[in-house]
Amino acid sequence: MKQFLIEEESEKKNILSMHKSLMKEQTRATGELDENERILRKAISAGCLKNGSLKRQKSTGKLYYKKESTKQIGKFVRFFPDMTFAFEDGSRKGKWVCPQLANATATEITTQQTTADNESKIATEIKKGWKKLETLRAEGVDLTTLDKVYDTQVVGNVTLYRPKGSSTNFTPNTSTADFNKDQLSFISTFEQKGYKLNPSRIEQSTLVKVTDKDLGAPADLFPNGLVMWYNPNTQDDIKRNDGSVLSDVLSNQSIDRQACRKNVTDYFETFRRKNSIVIDPATINKAKRIVQACKDEHYGKWGIAGGGNRLDNYLDILSGNKEGGPTSYGDDSIWRIK
């Protein structure tokens, strides 16, 4: 009977020991001890803790660094990862510091923030059509031609790729909701006039490119720029507003001499006022073709109604044959006729 009780007590101790071991493993699994160990080992590497060793409390599994006090020989001090210390005999407690550890932590935070910023930038650029190398590989792109076919940019340690010629594409929904709404509203206004956004590369070969500046967009509306396109060879694809300052020119496209008198005058006066009004390039281009036709047909032949010299003078100025007209290059070159 006595032997049986001894064996039973031994079994209880074994079970209790296994239970404590399991509890320690579960505590390790939470990651808390791993973090504590990381802090202490960094302090050791930095030289803040030396001439001692890492220990773990048997009852709690709590990690600490144990060393002999340099001032009180024979007394041992425990340094804990929460930056506190305690003498094993209970005679003293306090805080310990490690400047190198603080600097390392600050560097880690900065690195983590930089990584987060880079990841956010990469996500935005992907919305704009840029792709990672692994994406191109999965799509079966010939990687040997990347330098010839793709533009590249590097964000952090990641290289992004986009087909050459795609830089003029505008990608919505890459800013705040209100800002994006204003951008789309501006674009919609010109799409209704016949402008195109992001045409294919084949379409671009027959279209004229204009920028947000050409279209009169507010300076801060498109931080990354905007490019739209229009067809200069058709009359019906660009719709005008009745309030256009060139509406009379556009409404009478005939080269009838009397109509041309007004067309040339209106076009010249609009050019003269160009800095105080905003007119989209396609509208100017259409009106210019009409005025060019008027010059080709009626220059020097305005008849007896009078005003011929004045109209020829307007045409000479607009052609660059006299001072005061549009230059052959620069922001006002679109107004120049031949």
Image (cartoon, helix red, strand yellow):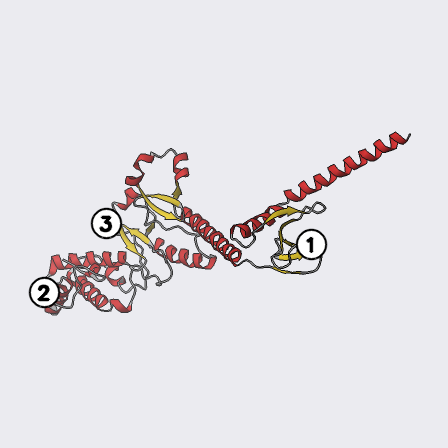
Q: Nearer the viewer, residue 72 or 261?
A: 72
Left or right, 214 with reference to 184: left
Q: Position of residue 9 (x, y in %)?
A: 83, 35
Q: Quadrant of residue 182?
A: bottom left
Which is in the foreground here, disc 3 or disc 1? 1
Q: Is residue 28 visible?
A: yes
Amino acid at the residue labelled 3: Asn
Q: Is residue 48 left or right of residue 75?
A: left
Mark nearer the N terminus (3 vs 1): 1
Q: Nearer the viewer, residue 149 or 22?
A: 22
Q: Which mark is residue 303?
A: 2
How far apart marks 1 and 2 lie (CA) works out to 116 Å
Quadrant of the rendered image containing residue 146: top left
Query: Depth-wise, is mark 2 or mark 3 nearer the camera?
Result: 3
> Label 2 vs label 3: CA separation?
31 Å
Give how far apart the Cα atoms at labels 3 and 1 are. Answer: 92 Å
* Marking on residue 156: none
Position above or below: 311 against 61 = below
SS under mark 2:
loop
Q: Amino acid at mark 1?
A: Glu
Residue at (9% x, 65% y) in the render:
303
Residue in the foreground of this view, choosing between 188 and 248: 188
In terms of secondary structure, where does tag 1 sit? loop
Q: Position of residue 178 (x, y in %)?
A: 46, 59
Relative vertical location of residue 302 with respect to residue 144 in this rendering, above or below: below
| Residue type at tag 2 | Gly
Q: Where does label 3 land, which residue?
A: 233
